[in-house]
Image (cartoon, rainbow, N blue to C red):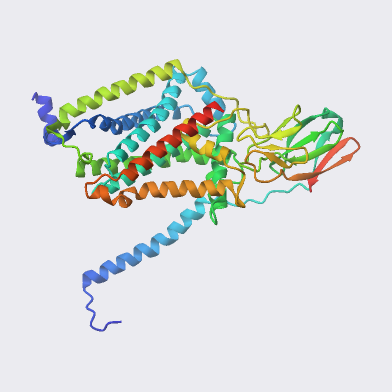
């Protein structure tokens, strides 16, 4: 510290005021930022869901349902296989549609296409649809994380 | 002056203001026509404020009631469809006039020293206006709006470090839901209007401080156009024409409300955002999923941020303009930007 530094009453008050502003507003800014960020609320995670009767899904058709707040698409193929994938397009998150005539999933937002194994085959989607495990139990379709 | 005018003048000093405005003049030259678009953008902003406040009387921002309240406005409230159409069409016209104003000031080099901050505040206003369009789009809570917002709020995810956080803040959670509607509503009716009023105030004050810019190499006719009443009358003619266009569009092409959001429905075929986001939409559609091992959204994000930052820096990059010389490179860059926008929007409509 410079011993010859002359601190006037005005300098002292200005610096005290600046310090006060800093000390007051930094915590307030922190609180404001924390307020804007939504709280992370833990919700009950389902391990497995019952997606309904196997026979309720016609051949070569699909239905969309919710699994832990995420949309999944359940498809019954012409070969009588039942498969489940995330219905969320891996490009920008739109919900895909099953096209029975083309036997594929299509996202109508930007035209991405996925085959019946979930693989991205056309459009801007960068990766395949996430698969889910499907089990049949007395005609009921049970879906769980793969 | 009659007695009432004298009474008013004694309290408000209006004659001082009128004297000041009549001394102020607007340059008269072959490009003066382009000056009207700033005022016209302000006019459509005022229409937005008035119709927005009217819609607030009936609108209810919850997932259960939003779509129904807009349907109620359209079908039950007297002239509700008209007020809603005025709001939607004036939003489109506001974006269009802001864009024309921005590009005209760009080509006239109105951003050059000492008006750099006018350019910066104007460009920020364009972003705020686009923010109005984006946040207002979800409020009717219909299918198209839902997926448009899904896409729009998903794009920032690939921003390094803060991407996830930005998505969370915009959506109020992981998914587009009631929290997202509340947040975008708050942005649309409170935060953005406050920000835009501040920015418009700054922009107009700077215009007052520096006066209207004259393009490089143009010698204006003397005397200029007195601001009051001559230029104000010109502005009023432009505003009247703008109002006529707005009424024509609102009456002949009233906006339609889509089906209520079903989060488990597939995105409808042919879904597209508003025309002013089509350049970004088409770019996202055309680029492949991965570019050199990096996701296309990340590449587009970086590109968009780079373009915006460059646009902000134009007054500081174009040193020649500050010295009164026109650099052809900046004219070419502006023309390329316009051409790209036209091509992308046309492709989005035609394909």
Q: Position of residue B144 (x, y in %)?
A: 57, 30
In the rendered view, tell whether residue B22 sits above or below residue A8.
above
Can residue B121 be seen here?
no
Identify which residue, A56 or B294, lies in the foreground.
B294
Judged from this view, the residue extending furthest toward the right is: A138
Image quarter of the N terminus of chain B: top left
In the rendered view, tell whether residue B160 sits above or below residue A53.
below
Identify which residue, A36 or B132, lies in the foreground.
B132
Q: Position of residue B351 (x, y in %)?
A: 57, 28
Left or right: A114 in relation to B217: right
Q: How many marks overall?
A: 0
Left or right: B296 in relation to A54: left
Question: At 62% from the left edge and 44% from the top edge, which residue is drawn?
Answer: B289
In the rendered view, tell whether residue B153 sits above or below residue A39.
above
Can residue B312 be seen here?
yes
Kindly indicate the quadrant of the structure image that contains residue A121.
Answer: top right
Judged from this view, the residue extending furthest toward the bottom is: A3
Left or right: A41 in relation to B326: right
Identify which residue, B33 or B288, lies in the foreground.
B288
Q: Position of residue B8 (x, y in %)?
A: 14, 30
Question: At 67% from the left edge and 32% from the top edge, which residue is drawn?
Answer: B266
Question: At 26% from the left edge and 50% from the top edge, which residue is drawn?
Answer: B320
Left or right: B341 in relation to B115: right
Identify which residue, A120 or A54, lies in the foreground.
A120
Q: Position of residue A44 (x, y in %)?
A: 72, 48
């Amino acid at each position: 510290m410079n011993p010859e530094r002359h601190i006037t009453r005005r300098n002292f008050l200005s610096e005290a005021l600046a310090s006060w502003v800093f000390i007051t507003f930094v915590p307030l800014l922190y609180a404001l930022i924390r307020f804007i960020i939504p709280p992370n609320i833990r919700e009950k995670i389902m391990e497995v869901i019952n997606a309904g009767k196997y026979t309720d899904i016609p051949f070569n058709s699909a239905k969309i349902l919710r699994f832990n707040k995420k949309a999944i698409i359940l498809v019954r193929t012409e070969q009588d296989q039942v498969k489940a994938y995330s219905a969320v397009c891996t490009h920008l998150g739109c919900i895909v549609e099953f096209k029975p005539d083309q036997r594929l999933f299509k996202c109508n937002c930007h035209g991405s296409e996925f085959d019946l194994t979930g693989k991205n085959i056309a459009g801007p989607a960068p990766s395949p649809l996430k698969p889910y495990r499907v089990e049949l139990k007395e005609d009921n379709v049970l879906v769980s994380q793969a | 002056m009659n007695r009432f005018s004298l009474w008013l003048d004694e309290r408000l000093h209006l004659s001082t203001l009128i004297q000041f405005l009549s001394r102020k003049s607007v340059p008269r030259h072959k490009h003066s026509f382009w000056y009207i678009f700033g005022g016209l953008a302000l006019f459509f902003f005022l229409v937005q404020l008035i119709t927005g406040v009217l819609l607030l009387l009936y609108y209810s921002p919850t997932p259960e009631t939003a779509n129904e309240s807009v349907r109620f406005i359209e079908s039950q409230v007297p002239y509700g469809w008209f007020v809603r159409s005025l709001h939607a069409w004036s939003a489109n016209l506001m974006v269009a006039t802001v864009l024309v104003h921005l590009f005209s000031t760009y080509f006239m080099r109105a951003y050059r020293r000492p008006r750099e901050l006018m350019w910066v505040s104007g460009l920020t206003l364009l972003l705020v206006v686009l923010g109005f369009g984006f946040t207002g789009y979800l409020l009717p809570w219909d299918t198209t709006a839902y997926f448009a917002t899904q896409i729009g709020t998903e794009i920032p995810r690939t921003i390094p470090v803060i991407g996830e956080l930005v998505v969370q803040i915009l959506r109020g959670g992981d998914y587009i839901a009631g929290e997202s509607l509340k947040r975008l509503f708050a942005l649309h009716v409170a935060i953005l209007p406050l920000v835009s009023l501040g920015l418009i105030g700054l922009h107009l004050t700077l215009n007052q401080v520096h006066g209207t810019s004259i393009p490089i190499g143009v010698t204006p006719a003397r005397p200029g156009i007195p601001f009051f009443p001559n230029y104000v009358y010109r502005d009023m003619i432009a505003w009247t024409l703008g109002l006529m266009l707005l009424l024509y569009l609102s009456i002949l092409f009233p906006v339609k409300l889509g089906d209520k959001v079903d989060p488990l429905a597939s995105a409808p075929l042919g879904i597209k955002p508003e025309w002013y986001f089509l350049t970004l939409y088409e770019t996202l559609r055309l680029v492949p999923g991965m570019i050199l091992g990096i996701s296309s959204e990340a590449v587009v994000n970086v590109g968009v941020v780079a373009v915006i930052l460059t646009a902000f820096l134009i007054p500081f990059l174009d040193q020649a303009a500050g010295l009164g010389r026109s650099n052809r490179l900046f004219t070419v860059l502006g023309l390329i930007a316009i051409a790209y926008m036209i091509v992308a929007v046309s492709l989005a409509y035609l394909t």
